[in-house]
């Protein structure tokens, strides 16, 4: 069974840092793009950052210069380094991955990890 498992969320004060991790496991043939999304209370899920298989990245404007996405292909893991956190970054963070398994190509989602930033 293919799955994504996030970790690293928590409660921090404004200005502090967190590092989220998301590991893919299962019968995976190839992982294409991986990304992070977030959903704040009462709001729709929004795109945060994306990294292609070749390492190209893009970000939503509100996080540029503060959040950095990276990946370790040997570990099938994507990271989100979050610096200078703000209260408006509070949300459940979800990772996603465009994965090719031995049966299909699909977008997979993790279960989410809570990030809370206090002022």
Image: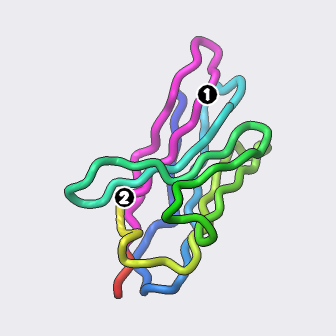
Asked whether 7 or 15 is in front, the reply is 15
- Can you tell which quarter of the image residue 102 is in? top right
Residue 42 occupies quadrant: bottom left
Residue 116: assigned label: none
Can you give x and y, in whole percent of width and height, for residue 32 in the image? 68, 31
Main secondary structure found in the magenta portion: strand
Magenta region: 93-116
Disc 2 and disc 1 in contact, CB within 8 angstroms: no
The colour scheme used here is rainbow
Q: Position of residue 67 (x, y in %)?
A: 59, 66
Categorize mark 2 by other alpha carbons within 10 Å: few (<14), some (14-19), many (20+).
Answer: some
Whether residue 106 is situated above or below residue 31 in the rendered picture: above
Location of mark 1 (residue) = 99
In the picture of the structure, the residue carrying the numbered disc 2 is 92
* In the image: residue 29, left or right of residue 92: right
Q: Is residue 82 above or below residue 3?
A: below
Quadrant hosting residue 54: top right
Q: Given the current orientation, which residue lies at the most extreme left position?
A: 42
Which quarter of the rendered picture does the C terminus lie within?
Answer: bottom left
Q: Residue at x 59, y 30 (%)?
A: 98
Q: Is 68 included in the stretch rendered in magenta?
A: no
Which of disc 1 and disc 2 is earlier in sequence? 2
């Amino acid at each position: 069974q293919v799955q994504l498992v996030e970790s690293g969320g928590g409660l921090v004060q404004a200005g502090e840092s967190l590092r989220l991790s998301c590991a893919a496991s299962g019968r995976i043939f190839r992982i294409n793009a991986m990304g992070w999304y977030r959903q704040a209370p009462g709001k729709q899920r929004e795109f945060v950052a994306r990294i292609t298989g070749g390492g190209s990245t893009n970000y939503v404007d509100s996080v540029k210069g503060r959040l950095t996405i990276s990946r370790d292909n040997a570990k099938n893991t994507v990271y989100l380094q979050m610096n200078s956190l703000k209260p408006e970054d509070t949300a459940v963070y979800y990772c996603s991955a465009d994965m090719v398994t031995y049966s299909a190509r699909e977008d997979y989602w993790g279960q989410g990890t809570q990030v809370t930033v206090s002022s």
